[in-house]
Image (cartoon, grey):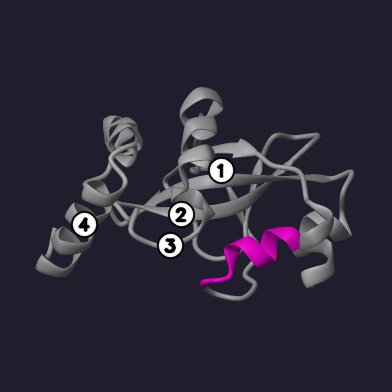
Amino acid sequence: MNPFQKEHFDAAIQTKPFLRLLTDRLLSIGGELVVCWNDDFTNSEGFVKLLLEFGKTLDGSKAILKELEMSRCHQNSIRLAIKHPKKYERHIGYGLSDSLWRPHSFLVNRKTGKILETTVLREKYFSIPVPIMDSERMEL
């Protein structure tokens, strides 16, 4: 963990102590650090509770890469889930790559169970399925 990461990680845990349970869970699966200092819904208390209660670990070794916009996984997943609602289910949670767990969205093929990745292939995923909301449809 570099000094920047340590400072931001410590600050996130101090201001949102509930993140400790999530980071402990993710690090028990693998990796060295959880990027939990982004200020978005993936580290909100409500979402973290849902993730801890219902989250599943998925293996990324057989994921399929369909490169779309980098660093736009949430938007990429929404677009494809809207375009192919019977084929894909959107998942939100965290993805592990380069020993870091990062907030992440991706798709799971409803028929085959295979992961469709839109940015960078990940080693593992920890997520829950989340339906597309009407407000997200309007944002595109």
Disc 1 to disc 2, C-alpha distance: 20 Å
Residue farthest left in this picture: 3
Could you tell me the amino acid type at mark 4? Ala
Q: Secondary structure at mark 4?
A: helix
Q: Is residue 76 left or right of residue 98?
A: right
Answer whether residue 52 is visible to the viewer in this image.
Answer: yes
> What residue does disc 2 label?
103
- Disc 3 versus disc 1: nearer the observer: 3
Q: Earlier in the sequence, mark 1 or mark 2?
A: 1
**Nearer to us in this view, 138 or 90:** 138
Residue farthest bottom in this picture: 69
> What residue does disc 1 label?
62
Instruction: Provide the residue span drawn in magenta.
Output: 71-78
- Disc 1 versus disc 2: nearer the observer: 2
Q: Quadrant of the C terminus?
A: bottom right
Disc 2 to disc 4, C-alpha distance: 17 Å
Q: Earlier in the sequence, mark 3 or mark 2?
A: 3
Q: Are marks 3 and 4 in contact (CB under 8 Å)?
A: no
**Nearer to us in this view, 58 or 46:** 46
**Nearer to us in this view, 137 or 44:** 44
> What residue does disc 4 label?
11
- Disc 1 versus disc 4: nearer the observer: 4
